[in-house]
């Protein structure tokens, strides 16, 4: 038996974090695409890690439960790295809300039922949630605390109140951060910690597709005009995750760390400020 790290989302950010904190553990990798999961598993196995790949649909509670049950066959679940999700360019409003908002909430809830004492988790949200106008205290509370099966019934998530897939993505990422605060209280009852990382533009194969796509100029302008003057790397996100998931981060739980090269700062107070109509 080994301590187990569950990695959901077989992409560059998730792999970078798992490589940083997964040594000596069984790493169970779940992804909507079994091919993607197997590709990451192969890369990590050839680098000396102990992996197991399986198909997992973040929008399905049953699929999440199957992943967790398989993970428990290898040993106690000590870590969760959730890097699964869809982007607003990839999916319509309904899918963004079902995967990124509902699915993440279910995953944090289900892993929270089994996380071992001393365990830690991180979920990946986005800088995007920080650029949305503030919600009311009541709306924030609903996003944080509503029973997972009632989340998608909230008024603010109904089609007439969601402008487009980008707005849905912003709402989902705001919900992720609020949900982490709520679940961190429950995880704490089991002696475990849970945090969120909100990255800005990180260079991954998906991001490169975006740079060359219809919104490419928007993204290039964003990282050019942020204080860092460049996009970030998956390993820089992993630097933050390593702190949060190690003993050095033992007093950090229920928090969101923004790692965006200052793009959010520039959006509010610098050259990325939206032009007034």
Image (cartoon, rainbow, N blue to C red):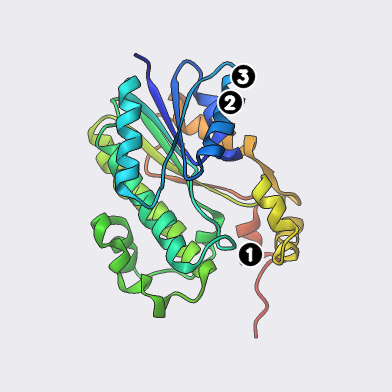
**Residue matched to label 2:** 42
Toward the viewer: 223 or 253? Answer: 223
Toward the viewer: 44 or 222? Answer: 44
| Image quarter (top left, top right, bottom left or bottom right) of the N terminus | top left
Furthest-front residue in this view: 35
**Residue matched to label 1:** 267
| Crowdedness near tag 3: few (<14), some (14–19) or many (≥20) residues, C-alpha within 10 Å | few
Relative vertical location of residue 157 with respect to residue 197 in this rendering, above or below: below
**90 on left or right of 153:** right
Q: Nearer the viewer, mark 1 or mark 2?
A: 2
Distance in Å between CA atoms under marks 1 and 3: 40 Å
Pointer 3 with pointer 2, Cβ within 8 A: no
SS for callout 2: helix
Q: Residue at x 65, y 57 (%)?
A: 263
SS for callout 3: loop
**Residue matched to label 3:** 47
State how many labels appear.
3
Picture coordinates of residue 148, whole percent (x, y):
27, 55
Pointer 1 with pointer 2, Cβ within 8 A: no
């Amino acid at each position: 038996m080994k301590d187990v790290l569950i990695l959901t989302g077989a992409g560059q950010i998730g792999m970078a974090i798992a490589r940083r904190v997964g040594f000596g553990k069984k790493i169970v990798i779940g992804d909507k695409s079994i091919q993607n999961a197997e590709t990451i598993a192969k890369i990590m196995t050839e680098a000396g890690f102990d992996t197991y790949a399986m198909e997992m649909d973040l929008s399905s509670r049953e699929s999440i439960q199957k992943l967790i049950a398989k993970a428990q066959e290898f040993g106690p679940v000590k870590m969760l790295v959730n890097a699964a999700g869809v982007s607003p360019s990839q999916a319509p409003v309904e899918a963004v809300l079902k995967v990124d908002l509902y699915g993440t909430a279910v995953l944090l809830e289900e892993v929270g039922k089994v996380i071992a004492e001393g365990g830690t988790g991180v979920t990946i949200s986005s800088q995007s949630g920080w650029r949305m106008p503030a919600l009311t205290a009541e709306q924030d509370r609903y996003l944080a605390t509503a029973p997972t099966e009632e989340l998608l019934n909230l008024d603010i998530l109904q089609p007439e109140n969601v402008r487009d897939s980008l707005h849905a993505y912003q709402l989902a990422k705001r919900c992720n951060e609020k949900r982490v605060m709520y679940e961190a209280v429950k995880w704490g009852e089991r002696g475990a910690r849970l945090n969120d990382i909100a990255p800005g533009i990180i260079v991954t194969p998906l991001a490169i597709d975006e740079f060359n796509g219809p919104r490419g100029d928007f993204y290039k302008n964003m990282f050019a005009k942020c204080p860092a003057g460049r996009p970030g790397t998956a390993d820089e996100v992993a630097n933050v995750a390593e702190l949060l998931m190690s003993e050095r981060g033992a007093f950090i739980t229920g928090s969101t760390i923004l790692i965006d090269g200052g793009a959010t700062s520039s959006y509010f107070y610098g050259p990325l400020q939206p032009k007034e109509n």
